[in-house]
Each structure stands twice: as structure tokens, then as C-alpha cells.
Image (cartoon, rainbow, N blue to C red):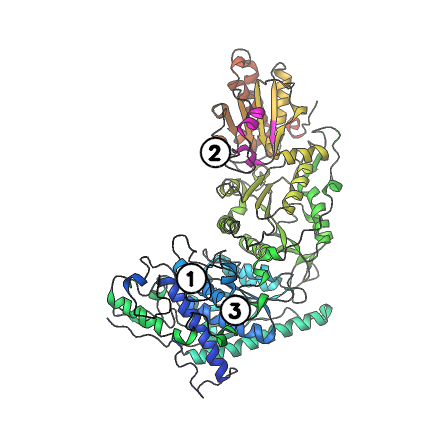
Amino acid sequence: MAATTSRAASDAATPGRRPGPLSEDELRLIDAWWRAANYLSVGQIYLLDNPLLREPLRPEDVKPRLLGHWGTTPGLNLVYAHMNRVIKARDLDAIYITGPGHGGPGLVANAYLEGTWSEVYPKVGRDEAGLQQLFRQFSFPGGIPSHVAAEVPGSIHEGGELGYSLAHAYGAAFDNPDLVVCCVVGDGEAETGPLATSWHSNKFLDPARDGAVLPILHLNGWKIANPTVLARIPDDELVKLFEGYGHRVHIVAGDDPGKVHQALASTLDTALDEIANIQAAARAKPATAPDRPRWPMIVLRTPKGWTGPEIVDGVQVEGTFRSHQVPVSNARGDDEHRQILEDWLRSYRPEELFDDRGRLVPELAELAPHGARRMSANPHANGGLLLRDLVLPDFRDYAVEVAKPGTTSSEATRVLGGFLRDTMAANGSTFRIFGPDETASNRLDAVFEATDKTWNAEITPIDVQLAPDGRVMEVLSEHLCQGWLEGYLLTGRHGLFNCYEAFIHIVDSMFNQHAKWLKVTRDLDWRRPIASLNYLLSSHVWRQDHNGFSHQDPGFIDHVVNKKAEVIRVYLPPDANTLLSVADHCLRSRNYVNVIVAGKQSALNWLSMDDAIVHATRGAGIWGFASNDDGGEPDVVLGCAGDIPTLETLAAVDLLRQHLPDLKVRVVNVVDLMRLQDSREHPHGMTHAEFDALFTTDRPIVFAYHGYPWLIHRLTYRRTNHDNLHVRGYKEEGTTTTPFDMVMLNDLDRYHLVMDVIDRVPELADRAGHVRQLMVDSRLRARAWTREHGEDLPEVRDWTWPY
């Protein structure tokens, strides 16, 4: 059935019809840019050849597989065109974040129209051949993805997994006083939990110090197959909702292109004036600035799939969910569908937009901002260009004195807090700490000696450490912390995310997306490396005895190691000095995700600072002070990774020395977990020769691990001696109990480790039965003590290394 093509802006610039801030010529030109971006967007989804429609479309001109999303794209192109106008008029420093990232063809189109695409990818020239390549590459094998991925210049947000655009936008704006972040939020995306809480980010934005975020909520009314919630509530309810979030709401609505152009131009001018006034007031007199400002936002209500086919096969497409992806589904094989596609493309009048060589006509090319003012070329969207090394204090200055291993105790994260405090003091606009109300709980509270917590809502006399210009970002949303940090890193700064170990799982999928982004950027030479995303996970599984089972989960490590080896790193420092060395290394690194797991409770100090540096650099090594194999072949190897497994392993060694003094024991401690993997699979991995030198080729290995034990088997399954490896770790047993009862519940305690040694060293089978029975009895006695006294046995609780 024939289709009619909607108002493709063909009459947008009719003389005398459009009152508003745009002159007739400005309206004509901005509409022409929009048409050009829409034309390129449709071409990317559909065309292999004939990019300028110099002849009627043939089946072979159309891609055999039609992949992409049209519905959101015309709205994205509309906002982009209007942002370019205000960038040029006001000399704005602005970037564009695309919440509905499935509108990838639109952002690719605008990057091409601005010239950036051809600068970054010279094979896609600014001519007819380049247009053909631009169309062909989209969602095509060997080409580019369908979303606003890392391959798209100007993007810091792929938008594949929805919900994080606004958090990324605010992260980009923090400490960027001259930056305006235009963030288009899709109305489907707006239904996600992370996006819903992201509206509160304006309570953490300091107009005196930070840049501005201009949210544009795009209400096109539909998701894949359903209406959107916010599009189906009355405007007065919608306005009250966002006024409740603290915004001044401006609504632009319509389906007449000329009227919408004028309304959006006027509204953008108003919103940017409001932003400028807010910032000027705050920066003129920060101490007496007015109460928290009401930042502007725009609600843009336009049809989904606007300017596309109205009707296809007898059903409404434009303005419905049917336009979400590919409105004309069989343009290669069906003559009628192909004619609809051709009419659609020709409705944009490409002959007015591109010259005979396929170049954008000069009057349209001139609409683009110049150089780094182009949103597709803004260095803030390629943050490595702006990245500067942190000014780090010497971590050795914070060392804990260790005259003898295992005899004094420290709270490792509290020690680290002093280092982070001075790091914050030395990097006043390039380093922030993020956490879901857990910075003090994780004993990093020394940082509050250098700065407060960011807070731009009401402050009462009983509040402490809250200030608009604070630099510790705390909000009870792991999603928001992660999104802010990612936006901060992607625009060229540094940061650290501290969190309870069990609850970092809340951002599992956000970690996924960032790790994927880093993986892709490693193959893009024009994307400069950014600072690593650093997780500090504390209040961990073995010291959540007070909160119970819900707080006990070390599985984030398992999740992380699924990602590409060149991106992920996992560190399990056994004590405070090793934590300092590891943290310094991670804060200096680039393009990684670093996971550090460290306890906050008082724990034994094992290594002097010099020894800790060597050990952390090596990543895994024999602890000579705890071993008695005298450089020869041991009878058994005790491996350990993590602070509590290390404690229990060393206590087990003490018991073995007391009761089986002739047994030759080697202790191997692992800080860098990926050292266990084969060097052919991970750049930090050991060769087989290196691994065998530590763990032997044929002796029993009892390995005490912080997390789920099967991960160690995964990492070591190719090793010569894997058949002799027995791992103890967390096996999903927990409750509210004592610290030692927690390790006993999971058979990670010192007594059970001794039993494991006896069970696995063949020559002990006939002569160590009495020792094994003693260990069984010791476990029973320890458990009975907890049930009677509510605390651990003094000999367990107060144990120190006696040698």
C-alpha cells in the first residue's frame, strides 16, 4: 500500500509563517541541516550504494540486513542542529550526551556533517564516495556499531544499556566551570531506576565551580512496543514532577517543523540565559550566593519517527512504536517498500544539501562550529587529551612501621585515608572520591580533613562535613556514584569509588559497559587513554559478621575477570603497607578497571614498606619468614590471597610448626590475582615456569582465597600442578555471627586448613591422625565458645605471629 511521507520540513521556512527568534534565512538553514542529518541517518540504515539517489533505487542499492533505530533519531538530529546554533552564537564549550544511544545514525551523521568523521577516519571522505562508505559501514560486518559507541567522535556515552546518560552528564560537568553538557534523555530511558535518581544530581552541582547540565527530556511517546509513562501523564503533572526535582521546566511540543524550530530556538536561548545568570550570581559572590538554584530543563515532545513514512502496509508508523527500528522492513525484496524508502529519502531533497561531488553545500557547512567547538571534536569528549597526571604524595610517608611480621595491627583503609586526604589536597580540581554513604564507614574519613562532602541542598546546624564546594561525592545510589565517576574520568579527570564489597554488585552491568568501552578504545588510536576506574571494596565478606548474610558476597571479582584481560586488574593486598603501594600504582594507571579489596578492621601488619613494594610489584611471591622449606622442595604449599585468608594461613602455619615440626611448608601470597593466570591469557600472568617455581609441579597446594574458590581453579586450570590444587574460600555460608565463626562456616579457618594439609600430604596419613583430631576438637571448642560468650576465643582473637 502506498505511503504518505510526513511533514519532512519541506515547508518549514515558508515566508512570513514562523514568528520567533530565527530569521527566515536562519530557519531555512537550520532546517536544511536537520534534513541533511536525517537523510544521512536513513541512508546509513538502508543504503549500500546510490548515496545521492542519482538514479532510482534498485534492490542491490539496499542492504540485505536492515539494522538500526530510526524512531529516536530525528529528535536527536533536531537538538544537535539547534545546539550548533547556540554554540556559534555564544561561543559555548559544549558536549552532547545521547541517552537513547540506539539513535547512533544521527550522531554519526552530525559528526560527518561537521567534518570530524572524515578527520578521524580519512577513508570516509567528504564526497560521494565517502557518503557511500559512510552508509555502507553502519551496522555492517567490518564497519561500525549501531549505537553511539566509542567509535563515534564526540561520544562519551554509548547508550546501549539505558539509564546512565544524566549521571554521565553531571560527572562531565563537575570541576568543568565553562562546560555545558547537553543531555538528551529518552522517555523510555527515563523509566529506569538509575535515571530516575539521576535527576537529584542538581543537588550536587556547584554553580560557582562546576559546569552546567541542560537535560532535554525527549518525549516521543513510545518504547519498542509500548507507550512511555512520562508521555502519558498530563503536562501539569509532568511539570510538577520535575519542579519537585528542582528544575525550571520548559516545554517545546509540536509536529510542525517550522514552529518547533522557532520554539526550540527560543527555549534554548532562555535556558542558556538562565544558566549564565545562575553561574554569574554564584561566581560573583560565592559566599552570599542565593539558595540552591532552579536549573533549567527542556521537555521536547515530538513524534517518534518524525519525518519518516506515515503509513506502511496500511498501518500508522510515524508517531508510533512501529517507527522504533526500521519502519520499512523489506526495501530490498519488495518493490512497494523500496518505493516508500525512495520517496522518504527524496523528501529531504538531497540535491539541495549536497553538491555534484557529494559535498555538503558551503552555506550548510558554515553552520557547524569551528575546530574544538564542534561537539564531535570537543576534547572533553576525548578526555585523554585533557588528562594530566595526579600530583601524588609519596605513599611511603604513610607507611606503618613493621619491625617484625604479624605482631602489630592497623586498619588498612584508615592508613590509606591519610594518603587519599593529601591526594585530594594536592589535586583540587582533578580528583574526587565517590561512595554510597560509606566513606567514613570504610574508614577513609581522613579525607574530610582536606575537603567536605559535596552538598547543595539544605544544610542544618547539626550537619557535619557538608558544603557546596566539597569534593567527596556521597549519595545512596551506587548507580549514581558509578555514573558520576565514569563521566568524570571520560572527560579527563581521576577518581576512586569506595563501596561495600557486597553491594558493588548493584553496578555489575555498569561496570560491564565501561569495560567494553575501554576495550574498544584501545583499538582507536585517536582516543587517548583516560585514568583508570578504581574500585576500593571494603567492609568485605569476612568482616560483615555484624550485618549478616545479605552483606556477604565477594562475587564482584568473578564478574570482573570475565572481561578482556588487557582491561581488568584485581588486587588483594594482605596489609596496610601493601595497600598503600597498590593504591599508588592504580591511581597512576591508565585505561584499566582496577579492583582493590581491603579490610577496614584492625588486622596484622605483615610487611615493611620496602618489602610491601617488592611484593606488590612482583604480584605473588614466597613469604620466606613464614616458610621453612629452606629453599628446597616443600612437602606442601600454602597459598593465600586476601587479608583474612592470609591471617588464617599464617595461623595454620603456626599450628603446623607446633604439631608437625618436621613438615616443610612453603607460603605463597598473591596480591595481584591475575598473576595466577597463564601469561598467554593475561599480561600479568605468570609463565608456567614461574608458576611452577612458586607452587611446584607435584606437591599438594592448599590455597586460601578471599572469594568463591572456583575462580582460582578457573585461573589455574592449565597449570602443571592443578590436579594437586585444593582451594578454600567463601562457599555461600554466612549469618550474623563472630569473625572467626564466619571463616569456620566456610571451612577457611586455620584449623580446617591444617586438616586439609594432613589430608593431602600422603606421608601424614599414618602419623598425623591425632593432630587432625585435635583440629576437629578445636573447631568444636571455638564454636561452642562463640555460642556461650558471643565473641571469639581469646587465643584466636588475639593471635599474633610468634616466630
| Residue to which mark 1 is pinned | 134
The foreground one among 92 and 635 is 92
Position in image of residue 196 (x %, y %): 50, 61
The foreground one among 733 and 756 is 756
Local secondary structure at mark 1 = helix
User: Eyeballing the image, is 491 above or below 761?
Assistant: below
Badge 3 local density, few (<14 within 10 Å), some, or many (20+)?
some
At horizontal 49% and vertical 25% (from top left) the residue drawn is 720
Disc 2 versus disc 1: distance between alpha carbons? Answer: 43 Å
Name which residue type carries label 2.
Answer: Arg
Residue 686: say if magenta: yes
| The label number, if any, that marks residue 714 in the structure image | 2
Disc 3 versus disc 2: distance between alpha carbons? Answer: 49 Å
At horizontal 50% and vertical 31% (from top left) the residue drawn is 716
Whether residue 138 sits left or right of residue 709 in the image: it is: left
Earlier along the polypeptide chain: callout 2 or callout 1? 1
| Residue to which mark 3 is pinned | 242
The quarter in which the C terminus is drawn is: top right
